[in-house]
């Protein structure tokens, strides 16, 4: 089982790498240059890719949290913890890539528009998630607290997603009309790089999450073995 | 007497509770908290003194002049309410736990959701008590037109959501290491969306009534309150169980 899993993971590692190489080629060389924003628009493919994976991973944490509360199994908690770790990495990526683009488009790294504010809040919530985990010693209790906090925190993810669709914002709305009714849509030449980078980020996200779950499981096994060793030594 | 208690037990433990059981079991907790507070005056007095200190400290820190106050007083009022409220929330459950009352509450024949509702309403009353003093104080010090229905609605919506999610998270925080530190860390980020909407909605009221821009923000607050209180009601059981 473990052997097989390691093989699948190796395949996924290489697949992520290969897809990322193709995505980079498509985004930088094959995609048409946007008319008003110019080259800086190319970061969009990675920005949206990270956003999609980040939000999906944080949603997985809500589902895993329900699993924790229903069954109390450790495996659900490992999934919840891993998906939030991966989600946090990707929402950090959204903020970093967004900031780089903002410098080019708005001539500032940061501005307190509703979208940016809610993204920052979301990031803080999931950092707090790990502080909470580290402050609870009992594993069962830690799993339950984290599960509930993962659900409460997901409200900020929804808020971030909806913010540009409900409120007037400087942040562009590419899909859907947006509150300011400036929704753009995507030129047809941008479709292949866009969907390919979404697929790439999805594969990368699944790979990272799987690695993380496996790592947590191995850490648990080591802990168990250590306890057994100590007990035998007595 | 005995039959009454039995009736309460039946009403409280069954899954399909009648409305009477709902209000009675939660009401008992609210009543207990209010009586305890009226006798000790420990929570509200601490929150009030702290709130006034925050007002004074802020005033020095930003040198709030009257002409500036109109723009900054709203945010500043919310920070005061949040900080004072957090002080109360922290004590409210910590005091149950330290004196062993939490175990008693958990043994009581009622659903855990009712314990949540009871504690939440208790906390709400304490925070509102502080607001009753602090809001007029703001009007007095900074001459901002806070005493109008739209603004009071925003304050109420904000306080309900804050008390709701605060009660849930303070129940979590009392079970952690370094619990006094933990509550602000886990509660503040979660409340920012609510405070953000509250500040925007209040601004619409203070800068002259603009219903078109007021209701979207008030709507966000209502949605936040409903979602958070529902999650808290449903999950409180998992937080307090040992």
Image: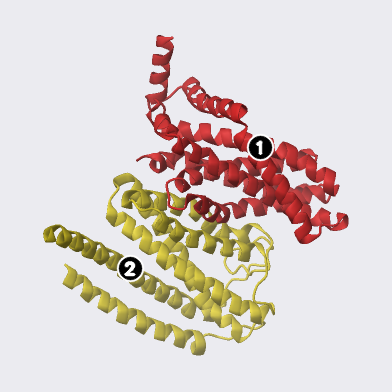
x and y percentages locating residue B9 in the rendered image: 39, 20
Of residues B197 and B166, which is closer to you in this image? B166
Of residues B79 and B36, which is closer to you in this image? B36
Residue drawn at point x = 68 percent, y = 68 percent: A170
Residue B44 as seen in the image, left or right of residue A92: right
Q: Chain of mark 2?
A: A
The residue positioned farthest toward the bottom in the image shown? A29
x and y percentages locating residue B159 in the rendered image: 64, 42
Q: Quadrant of residue A176?
A: bottom right
Of residues B123 and B11, which is closer to you in this image? B123
Chain drawn in yellow: A
Q: Quadrant of residue A135?
A: bottom left
Quarter of the image that includes the C terminus of chain B: top left
Residue drawn at point x = 77 percent, y = 52 percent: B73
Q: Is residue B88 above or below residue A198?
A: above
| Callout 2 and callout 1 share a chain | no
Q: Colour of chain B?
A: red
Quick check: can you spot residue B69? yes
Q: Which mark is residue B45?
A: 1
Q: Is residue B188 above or below residue B158?
A: below
């Amino acid at each position: 089982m473990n052997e097989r899993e390691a093989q699948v993971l190796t395949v996924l590692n290489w697949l992520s790498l290969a897809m990322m190489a193709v995505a980079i080629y498509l985004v930088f060389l094959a995609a048409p240059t946007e008319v008003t924003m110019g080259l800086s628009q190319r970061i969009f493919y990675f920005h949206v890719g990270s956003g999609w994976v980040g939000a999906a991973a944080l949603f997985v944490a809500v589902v895993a949290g329900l699993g924790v509360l229903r069954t109390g199994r450790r495996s659900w908690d490992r999934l919840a913890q891993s998906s939030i770790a991966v989600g946090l990495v990707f929402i950090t990526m959204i903020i970093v890539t967004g900031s780089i683009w903002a410098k080019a488009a708005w001539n500032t790294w940061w501005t307190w528009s509703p979208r940016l504010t809610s993204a920052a809040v979301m990031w803080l919530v999931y950092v707090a998630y790990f502080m909470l985990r580290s402050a609870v010693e009992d594993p069962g209790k830690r799993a339950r607290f984290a599960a509930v906090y993962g659900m409460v925190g997901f409200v900020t993810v929804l808020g971030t997603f909806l913010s540009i669709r409900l409120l007037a914002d400087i942040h562009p709305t590419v899909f859907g009309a947006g509150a300011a009714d400036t929704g753009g849509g995507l030129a047809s030449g941008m479709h292949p790089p866009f969907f390919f980078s979404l697929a790439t980020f999805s594969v990368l996200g699944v790979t990272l999450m799987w690695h993380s779950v496996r790592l947590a499981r191995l850490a648990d096994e080591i802990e168990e073995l250590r306890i057994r060793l100590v007990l035998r030594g007595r | 007497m005995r039959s009454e208690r039995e009736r309460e037990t039946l009403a409280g433990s069954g899954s399909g509770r009648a409305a009477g059981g709902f209000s009675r079991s939660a009401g008992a907790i609210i009543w207990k908290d209010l009586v305890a507070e009226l006798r000790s005056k420990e929570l509200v007095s601490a929150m009030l003194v702290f709130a006034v200190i925050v007002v004074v400290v802020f005033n020095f820190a930003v040198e709030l002049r009257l002409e500036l106050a109109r723009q900054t007083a709203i945010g500043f009022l919310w920070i005061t309410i949040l900080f004072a409220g957090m002080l109360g929330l922290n004590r409210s459950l910590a005091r149950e736990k330290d004196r062993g009352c939490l175990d008693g509450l958990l043994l009581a024949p009622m659903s855990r959701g009712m314990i949540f509702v009871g504690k939440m309403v208790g906390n709400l009353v304490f925070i509102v008590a502080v607001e009753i003093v602090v809001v007029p104080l703001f009007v007095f010090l900074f001459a901002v037109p806070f005493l109008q229905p739209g603004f009071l609605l925003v304050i109420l919506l904000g306080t309900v959501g804050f008390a709701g999610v605060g009660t849930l998270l303070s129940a979590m925080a009392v079970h952690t290491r370094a619990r006094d530190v933990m509550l602000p860390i886990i509660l503040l980020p979660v409340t920012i969306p609510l405070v953000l909407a509250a500040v925007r909605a209040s601004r619409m009221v203070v800068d002259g009534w603009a219903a078109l821009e007021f209701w979207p923000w008030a709507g966000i607050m209502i949605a936040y309150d409903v979602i958070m209180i529902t999650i808290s009601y449903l999950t409180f059981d998992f937080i307090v169980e040992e």
